[in-house]
Image (spheres, rainbow, N blue to C red):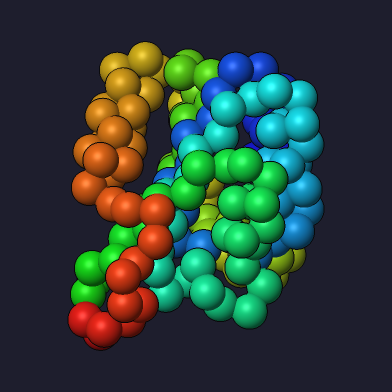
Amino acid sequence: RLRTLLQYASDKVDICVFTITDNTVSDEILAAVNRGVAIRIITDDRKSEDVGSDVERFREAGIEVRIDCSSHHMHHKFAIFDDHTMVDGSYNWTRAAADYNQESLIVSTELALVRKFQKRFSELWNAFTETCPNPHSNR
């Protein structure tokens, strides 16, 4: 379902996830960018540097990425598609989550709920930065 939502996105996608290491999802994100979809990603500093993380690949494609540089984890796993559909759940955007783990992923078009997640995304986007001055110095 997540890949389908990315395939049908036509305007913008705001992604706020702890980690993205599933290449099939990453490929759909990049395909959306190539179609002209505006993508913004928020992630955790520790996970952005993991083996298999696609954060640098996204940046090279021109995607804006913000990182939580705090001593705590940015552990959200939600996304908003074209201002009218959102997903949230336990699902990390990893191959293990897709193929092996017991995960939940809720999809909603309830506008009041979508708006709450948009507000949270904006708060985090404004609080975080593009890079961390000294990665992991607080952990």
Residue drawn at 35 percent across, 77 percent down: 135
Q: Nearer the viewer, residue 70 or 75?
A: 70
| Quadrant containing the C terminus in the rendered view | bottom left
Image location of residue 67, percent across then percent down:
38, 58
Q: Nearer the viewer, residue 135 or 12?
A: 135
Q: How many marks?
A: 0
Q: Nearer the viewer, residue 49 or 103?
A: 49
Q: In the shown orientation, is residue 139 left or right of residue 42?
A: left
Residue drawn at 46 percent across, 18 percent down: 83
Q: State the residue lying farthest toward the front.
A: 133
Q: Is residue 109 visible?
A: yes
Q: In the figure, 46 relative to 74: above or below?
A: below
Image location of residue 2, percent across then percent down:
65, 40
| Quadrant containing the N terminus in the rendered view | top right
Q: In the figure, 9 relative to 71: above or below?
A: above
Q: Is residue 75 visible?
A: no
Image location of residue 128, percent across then percent down:
29, 52
Q: Picture quarter containing residue 98? A: bottom right
Residue drawn at 69 percent across, 33 percent down: 33
Image location of residue 87, percent across then percent down:
49, 37
Q: Nearer the viewer, residue 49 or 106?
A: 49
Q: Picture quarter containing residue 122? A: top left
Q: In the shown orientation, is residue 87 left or right of residue 6?
A: left
Residue drawn at 58 percent across, 27 percent down: 38
